[in-house]
Image: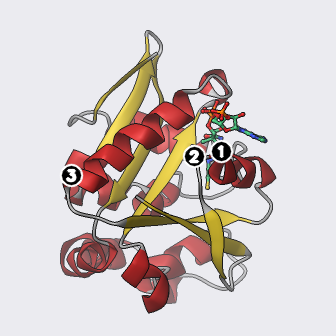
Amino acid sequence: MVIRPFRGGDEASLYEVCRRTAASGEDATGHNDDPDLLGHVYIGPYLRLEPDFALVLADDDGSAGYVIGTPDTRDFEARCERSWWPPLRQQYPLESYDEGDRDFRLVRLLYAPHTPPDDVVAEHPAHLHIDLLPRAQGQGHGRRLMTALFDRFRAAGAGGVHLGVSRANQRAIAFYDRLGFAPVADTSAGAILMARRL
Ligand SMILES: CC(C)(COP(=O)(O)OP(=O)(O)OC[C@H]1O[C@@H](n2cnc3c(N)ncnc32)[C@H](O)[C@@H]1OP(=O)(O)O)[C@@H](O)C(=O)NCCC(=O)NCCS
């Protein structure tokens, strides 16, 4: 396994890593009618708008994981509003979906993305997401990816980092705890926000 910078052409394989880890760390393939929606919400904007903060874990079989993020959450949100969400809102009109549809929750996020509270962002302006396929888990690669991204965040001037994690994903919560994160807020979506200083 090697850690390398993201490069154009990785998108499809990273969307697949996202899909295969999106059910609180387990495979979410087949959970949605549109297989790209998860990636459009959770990783696409980072690959497009923050490519310098996207690292890929890969072996001979291809992409096995990633860590992605931004050193400045509020600036990133503003740029997503300007250029990432508008074409997706045209592609996925909210009025075409009913609350019972399998894709409704993700489509609604295109219109009302999760946003952390001001007090969390003030202390911890960076945020990140990390996902590894099962073949890459439990071997220290997660820690290596996080450490490499922390270095990039520090170089960009960020003093702290936060992330969101589903309460159901106890394994990830234990991992983040081990990496120095502590809970800082609850969200209405069954997730908690965790944060640490850099
Ligand atoms: C969660 C995840 C990123 C962790 O990465 P990993 O490579 O498996 O973790 P590492 O092997 O680097 O472990 C790093 C440290 O966390 C600890 N840790 C990892 N999982 C743990 C667990 N379930 N319980 C307690 N400690 C744990 C390790 O013991 C290790 O400690 P050390 O470095 O101090 O010895 C990875 O398993 C994953 O991608 N899972 C599926 C997707 C997911 O859940 N992503 C998070 C969504 S919010």
Indicate the secondary structure of the residue bearing disc 3.
helix
The residue positioned 69% from the left and 72% from the top of the image is: 191
Residue 153 pos. (x, y %)? 29, 54
Expressed as whole percent of the image width and height from the top left, the position of residue 121 reads 41, 80
For residue 39, side relative to residue 7 (left or right)? right
Q: Nearer the viewer, mark 2 or mark 1?
A: 2
Observer-side mark, 3 or 1, equals: 3
Q: Is residue 198 left or right of residue 33?
A: left
* Badge number at residue 19: 2
Q: Disc 2 vs disc 1: Cβ atoms closer than 8 Å?
A: yes
Mark 2 / mark 3, whichever is N-terminal = 2
Amino acid type indicated by mark 2: Arg
Residue 25 spot, x, y in % from top left: 69, 47
- Disc 3 marks which residue? 155
Instruction: Point out the image quarter for the C terminus.
Output: bottom left
Determine the CA span between mark 3 and mark 1.
36 Å
At label 3, which amino acid type do we have? Ala
State how many labels appear: 3
Q: Give amino acid for label 1.
A: Thr
Residue 29: give its label: 1
From this view, report whether residue 27 is shown above or below residue 70.
above
Q: Nearer the viewer, residue 10 or 118?
A: 118
Secondary element at tag 2:
helix
